[in-house]
Image: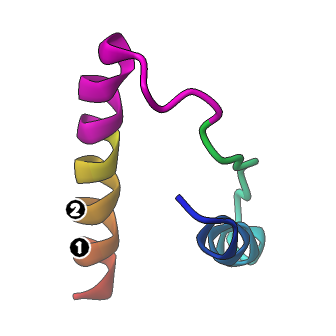
Amino acid sequence: MGPALVEGLRAATARTLRPVGLRAATVTTDPVLTGVRAEALAGLRAAVTAAAL
């Protein structure tokens, strides 16, 4: 996730009723986290797509 994307997400969530803190991942190469990260991204994409409909 690039800095521009993180900032865009921060700005978008700051305007919601229940804003949450976001930060970019600091560990991206640990094999244990690879599957968890993929699942989280899939969930985020699904949530964004559902909200856009």
- In-front residue for pair 53/23: 23
Front residue of 48/8: it is: 8
Identify the coloring: rainbow
Which quadrant would residue 32 be assigned to in this image? top left
Q: Is residue 20 left or right of residue 25?
A: right
The residue that appears at 22% across and 88% down in the rendered structure is 53
Main SS, magenta region, reads helix
Where does the image place residue 30, in percent across and percent down from the top left?
41, 17
Q: Is residue 46 left or right of residue 44?
A: left
Dot 2 and dot 1 residues touching (CB under 8 Å)? yes
Determine the residue positioned at 60% across, 38% down.
25
User: What is the three-letter code of the residue carrying label 1?
Assistant: Ala
* SS label for mark 2: helix
Whether 13 is among the magenta residues is no
Magenta stretch?
26-39
Mark number for residue 50? 1
Q: Residue furthest bottom?
A: 53
Crowding around mark 1 (Cα neighbors within 10 Å: few <14, some 14 to 19, many 20+) is: few
Instruction: Provide the residue designation for mark 2.
Output: 46
User: Separation of disc 2 and disc 1 at Cα?
Assistant: 6 Å
x and y percentages locating residue 27 in the rendered image: 57, 27
At horizontal 35% and vertical 56% (from top left) the residue drawn is 44
Name of the residue lying farthest toward the top = 32
In this rendering, the answer to whether 17 lies above or below 42 is below
Amino acid type at image mark 2: Ala
Instruction: Answer above or below: position of 38 versus 1.
Output: above
Query: At which x and y percent is residue 40?
Result: 34, 40
Among the 4 quarters of the image, the one containing residue 39: top left
